[in-house]
Image: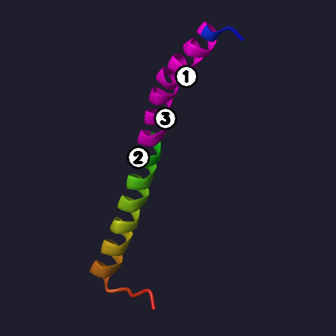
Amino acid sequence: MQWQFVVLLSVAIPIILFPVAFVWYMNLKGVYEALRGTKAKGVAGREASGHSTV
């Protein structure tokens, strides 16, 4: 491999992968927040109705 190609790859790969990793992080964060919100609503609903989990 020519040294220019190695330099090109070492510069291009992070530029391509950073936005991909950022979008993946945002998607996982959204799923996590949605699950957390659903769980919080379920717990609040049970407390308001007087039901216990025991």
Name the residue beneath numbered marker 3: 21
In which quadrant of the rendered view does residue 39 lie? bottom left
Name the residue beneath numbered marker 1: 13
Which of 12/22 is in front?
12
Q: Residues within 10 Å of mark 2 (few under 14, many from 20)?
A: few
Furthest toward the bottom, the residue is 54
Q: How was the colour assigned to the protein in this rendering?
A: rainbow
Decide which of tag 3 and tag 1 comes sooner along the chain: 1
Q: Residue 52: x and y, percent?
A: 39, 88
The residue drawn where x is 52% and y is 17% is: 12
Name the residue beneath numbered marker 2: 30
Q: Residues within 10 Å of mark 1 (few under 14, many from 20)?
A: few
Furthest toward the front, the residue is 3
* Residue 2 sits above or below residue 46 on the image: above
Magenta residues span 4-26
Spatial separation of the CA atoms under disc 2 and disc 3: 14 Å
Q: Residue 15: x and y, percent?
A: 47, 21
Q: Which three-letter amino acid code belongs to the residue tagged 3?
A: Ala
Disc 2 is placed on an element classified as helix
Image side of residue 47 versus residue 32, left or right: left
Q: Which three-letter amino acid code belongs to the residue tagged 2?
A: Gly
Q: Is residue 29 magenta?
A: no
* Residue 47 sits above or below residue 41 on the image: below
Which of 33/49 is in front?
33
Disc 1 is placed on an element classified as helix
Q: Residue 32: x and y, percent?
A: 43, 54
In which quadrant of the rendered view does residue 4 lie? top right
